[in-house]
Amino acid sequence: DTLINQIAAGEVVERPASVVKELVENALDAGARRVDIDLEEGGVRLIRIRDDGKGIAADELPLAVSRHATSKIASLDDLEGVTTLGFRGEALPSIASVSRFSLSSRRIGEDRGAVLEIDGGRLGEVAPKPHPQGTTVEVRDLFFNVPARRKFLKAERTELGHIEEWLRQLALARPDVELRVSHNGKPTRRWKGEGDQIDLGLSDVRIGEALGEEFARNALRVDHSGAGLRLHGWIAQPSYNRASADQQYLYVNGRAVRDRSIAHAVKQAYSDVLFHGRQPAYVLFLELDPRRVDVNVHPAKHEVRFRDARLIHDFVYRTLNDALAQTRA
Ligand code: ADP
Ligand code: MG
């Protein structure tokens, strides 16, 4: 089974950043209000993610790390309407097969915590361990048993940069959750959460944190619904003077995705109104009935497929076109 998991890991776990993404997504799916992310050596030596979500019962720990065991969907029907970030049940077994791994947790309502360790895929025994409500996943020495993979890891700075970019992407979608990051024992970033509420809308705070005050000041707010679709978020106006090809964030039902058709609609709306060859910077959220979109296209879940792609393209184009045109009137 270890071999099968390692093969699956090839698709899910490319580098430390993919581990961080999967584990933070699990924390968010568990309803965490705060997530601590501790890293060493760009995540290669250590990734430790602790959350205050609902936790996992001691006797469920082995299930959580077994292949295709997900608690998030129970049937094919559920898969068609999936609303959680995870649903394939692959991340934990894949990660555990290519690292020294431990999963500690205390389930909400239980008074004892437990831990399960896995060393390069070798499953240990569940043992009692004190733990606050929630879950901690520790991933040490990533790819220690897959030298071919390890060889492709880049310098500490580069791997850390990839992690930070994923965290920014997750943070933008969940301004209600506090994220604390440390690297080599030093706090490096804190994304404020509900506890820090000041008078600005929380999501405005996070937009400034994520993309800078300059973006926040120059971005147009969009929020439009129709035909069972809602598009909301921010698009930079021409007054935003910064190369922005790397500031293009698109979410479908809260999941960060790449979608060429929507990216095209945004760019087209932007250049048609503003006569601008420049790449638009944006953070846009598309919400629709989950049954209208297939999220199970790729193991890493970066892509989706729409039932009515043309309609969605036109909706995005029209919404942004109208909103931008008004700023010129
Ligand atoms: P998936 O997220 O696709 O269900 P994973 O392999 O990422 O698969 O996780 C397997 C299962 O372990 C999840 O379905 C969930 O029940 C449990 N789990 C993982 N991480 C957490 C967490 N941080 N808090 C609570 N439960 C978790
Ligand atoms: Mg998951």
Image: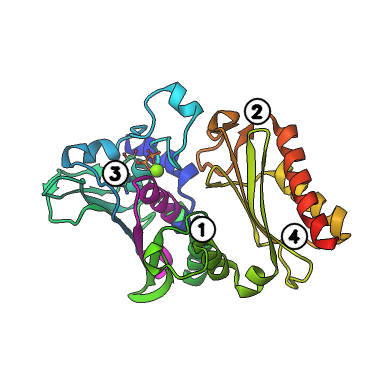
The quadrant in which residue 122 appears is top left
263 on left or right of 328 = left
What separation in Å lies between label 1 and label 2 (alpha carbons)?
27 Å
Q: Which residues are magenta?
A: 19-45
Between circles 1 and 2, the one closer to the viewer is 2
Image location of residue 201, percent across then percent down: 52, 63
**Mark 1 or mark 2: which comes first in sequence?**
1
Image location of residue 208, percent across then percent down: 57, 69
Image location of residue 159, percent across then percent down: 49, 64
Disc 2 residue type (three-letter): Arg
Q: Residue furthest right?
A: 275
- Location of the N terminus by quadrant is top left
Question: Regarding mark 2 in the picture, which secondary structure is present there?
Answer: loop
Reply yes or no: does residue 328 show up in magenta.
no
**Residue 280: assigned label:** 4
The quadrant in which residue 316 appears is top right
The quadrant in which residue 35 appears is bottom left
Q: Which residue is mark 1?
A: 166
Please say whether residue 22 is visible from this viewpoint.
yes
Camera-side residue of 285 and 155:
285
